[in-house]
Image: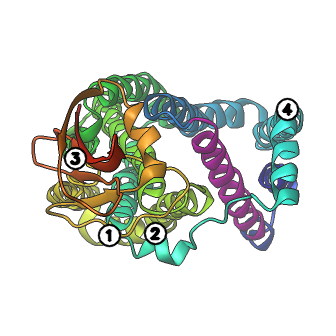
Amino acid sequence: MFGLCIIFLSTSVFAFGSSYGLMFIARGLQGMGSAFADTAGLAMIADRYTNEYERTKALGIALAFISFGSLVAPPFGGIVYQYFGKELPFITLAFIALFDGCLLLIIMQPVRIERTVLKTQGNLPKGTPIHRLLMDPYIAICAGCLTVANVSLAFLEPTISNWMSKSMKATNAQEGLVWLPAFLPHLAGVITTIKLADKYPSKQWLMAAVGLAIEGGSCFLIPFCTNFIALMIPISILCYGIALVDTAILPTMGFLVDTRHVSVYGSVYAIADISYSLAYALGPIVAGGLVDTIKFVGLNIVMTLITLGYVPVMYLLRHCYNVERPQNRELPPLKTDSVDHSFDQDDYASVKSYPGYEQNSTIKGESNHHHRQQFHHPIDPTNQYNYQSASTYEQDGKLLTQRTDYAY
């Protein structure tokens, strides 16, 4: 809500401001408002949807509308600016932000009441500090992936309009409309990732890697387009690749927080927002300098090398999915090769309720003077999880040991 209020204020300043200093302040305020709104919004989604499929679907829908705003804004702004001046598009966006804030106040009231009760009872969980999350290698790789995935758009947006006007004699409306068809491929990428993630949940790193490769190929094709219509094709392919990356990585970051830290998502999605912002902060500065030095073709070759160069790094994420989510406790960092966890009695309920659970039990007498029950969880490369338990107890004057194997 606070972020939307800041966006309303900054967008209003854009509408009526005319000096460079005022525009600079408004741009800074807009960035701060977006950080509050994006981080809190993604964290709320992750908090409400604990099921992996439902969370991926909800985050995918959110990403689709984030991209809808990013891709529709250029044609909307270009057309409205050309025919109605600069004030109208900003006034429209300001009131959309205000309306969204009012809806948020109504919809999130039960959540605020729930948080207040938990805080009063002292049961409100405390999240992992952001600096500790950044030290997690898996989260750091995900953050780097988000930055690299958005480098292409961050570099293209401030440079492609000037290139189009020089090479194609494009109008302001055409410079904006070239982004509009890309929303449909982006939506298709979101849907594709949601379906594949449901079927292959441990392969989301591969989906993100494929998305980066698609981005690299499309960046290479852009400077060779000679007309407005042809340019829409590689841009659409580019946005499809970005959708694969974002829709796979954001749920993965939530999963990593659940399994390796504390299930409070504000910090991890703040890292995601910082990753986006880093790309867009460096974009105008770096891209402008590169265009002056190596021209627009060279800029796209650099983007291709950056995105393709990060693809092998994604292979390091292949083990991060090989763990079941515990309840209300923080896990130590995982190894990259193998994992060996011991589960206590409190974890038994979550293990037993896992879909596809099977049980085989045998009882035999053994001499043992201690009563214990332990669950052992080795993770092997085939992703076949096996659980074993041993429980010793006394029955009819005899010590009996029950051994139970669990597999799913």
In the image: residue 4, left or right of residue 80: right
| Residue at the disc numbered 3 | 209
Residue designated by label 4:
103
> Which span is picked out in magenta?
25-49
Q: Earlier along the polypeptide chain: callout 2 or callout 4?
A: 4
Q: Which residue is mark 1?
A: 137
Disc 4 packing (10 Å; few <14; some 14–19; many ≥20):
few
Q: Dot 2 corresponds to which residue?
A: 282
Between the residue at mark 2 and the residue at mark 3, the CA separation in whole angstroms equals 23 Å
Between the residue at mark 1 and the residue at mark 4, the CA separation in whole angstroms equals 38 Å
Q: Give the main secondary structure, helix, strand or loop, of the magenta stretch.
A: helix
Q: CA distance from mark 2 to mark 4?
A: 34 Å
Residue 191 horizontal/vertical position (percent): 39, 23
Q: CA distance from mark 4 to mark 3?
A: 37 Å
Q: Nearer the viewer, mark 1 or mark 3?
A: 1
* Mark closer to the chain start, 1 or 2: 1
